[in-house]
Amino acid sequence: MGVAQSSVEEIRHERTGIVFRPGLDGVPATQSSICDIDGQQGRLSYRGYPLEELAAESTFLETAYLLIWGELPTTDQLKAFEHEVQMHRRVSFRVRDMMKCFPATGHPMDALQSSAASLGLFYSRRAIDDPKYIYAAVVRLIAKIPTMVAAFQLIRKGQDPIQPRDDLAYSANFLYMLTEREPDPFAARIFDRCLMLHAEHSLNASTFSARVTASTLTDPYAVVASAVGTLAGPLHGGANEDVLAMLEEISSPDQAAAYLDDAIANKRKVMGFGHREYRVKDPRAVILQALVEEMFERFGHDELYDVARALEAAAETRLGPKGIYPNVDFYSGLVYRKLGIPRDLFTPVFAISRVAGWLAHWREQLGANRIFRPSQIYTGSTQRSWIPLESRLPTAGA
Ligand code: COA
């Protein structure tokens, strides 16, 4: 239909000359001052601050503030933000009751998407040019998403959700609400650092979803709900769950190379490897691997780590020449497993963190908004004549 495949990466429309790049690979869709990725050198910074420094020095809430408002907070600003978030951790009994009606067998990401969207019913005013509304929406979403993730975990076990504890900081409180035990401070700090590592990553699929949704000027709860739905897929946030399943399937370091050869021969993606932006190991995977080792030193080894390392070593020669290396999802699951987080909560935990990035992009989008409305290259039929019902052939594949 007038479409010529000029290379693997791009398709040129013969009539108009328009070039289509599948997956918008390499196509800038916005300008942004939030996060910078150097995919050749493996560097990542939030608002100009290297991720390594933030992960060592900052906290998740401080990093969220930096992402959303563009500058590190002063002592007073940070205190006020932490206090506001703490005050808004509770969710309405109506939301909890709604969650009790969800099937216990449903995926926690679906539960989170529905409950995040439901917040729009309670705080529906779309005063998106009012800084007070924006601040309140940011606080509510950052405060309530962990509570909703933990609530569904208890509800699906047939228990009542437990209330947040005001004496616990953000990450420690989430682990407490999830496991019903006050976490070891060292474990809570590791978890907080994991949240910082996942908080933002430029125009990934879920953030793009968030910006597209934001560009219609809908409310921020719809923005976050659309992003949660996008994050759930196995090519995006959902990969962290699949990595652990894969490591369990491989089960022994000796089997790693054979697994990899089989996956490559059968054109199966190896979960936790590859990234559109990086041609080297994802800098977040480098930091996460160090966190895994810190966790194991303190709380005991996990033999799946040996499998992961064997897989990474085998991939060096098999996938490395194509620029395919471990991404953020490769080592995160091993940390979460040690923290006692169930596997199907790995992606909701990713969402708890990434909401900071989504909200930063929501604000940035509103600051210079133009609704997203890209074009397309039409490849369908032209000029067909109406076919009476009795003359039609069955539709193939329907
Ligand atoms: N395992 C094996 N091969 C991979 C691979 C992986 N994880 N990721 C990419 N490749 C190969 C593809 O098979 C393709 O090879 P080909 O050119 O011979 O056909 C080439 O690399 C390009 O892959 P493509 O899927 O087009 O890259 P992309 O930029 O569209 O996709 C990802 C990026 C992240 C979706 C992709 O690497 C992937 O599916 N990874 C596994 C899922 C994952 O870990 N996702 C989390 C991302 S943070």
Image (spheres, rainbow, N blue to C red):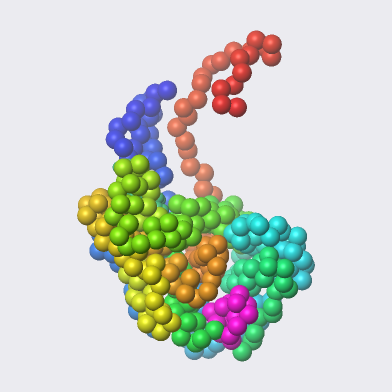
Question: In screen coordinates, is 13 left or right of 192?
Answer: left
User: 355 above or below 298?
Assistant: above
The answer to whether one can see residue 259 in this image is yes
Query: Which quadrant of the rendered structure holds the C terminus?
Result: top right
In front of the other: 179 or 122:
179
User: 190 above or below 276?
Assistant: below
In the rendered image, residue 22, in percent from the top left (x then y), is placed at: 40, 41
The answer to whether one can see residue 120 in this image is no
In the rendered image, residue 56, in percent from the top left (x then y), is placed at: 37, 81
- Which region shows up in magenta? 168-182
In front of the other: 234 or 140:
234
In front of the other: 280 or 368:
280
Name the quadrant containing residue 93. Answer: bottom right
Q: Residue at x 55, y 67 (%)?
A: 342
Question: In screen coordinates, is 238 left or right of 300?
Answer: right
Q: Residue at x 56, y 26 (%)?
A: 397
Q: Residue at x 22, y 54 (%)?
A: 317
Q: Is residue 181 magenta?
A: yes
In front of the other: 181 or 261:
261
In the rendered image, residue 34, in percent from the top left (x then y), is placed at: 42, 66
What is the chief secondary structure element of the magenta stretch? helix
Name the quadrant containing residue 105. Answer: bottom right
Q: Is residue 311 magenta?
A: no
Q: Residue at x 35, y 42 (%)?
A: 267
Query: Which quadrant of the rendered structure holds the N terminus?
Result: top left
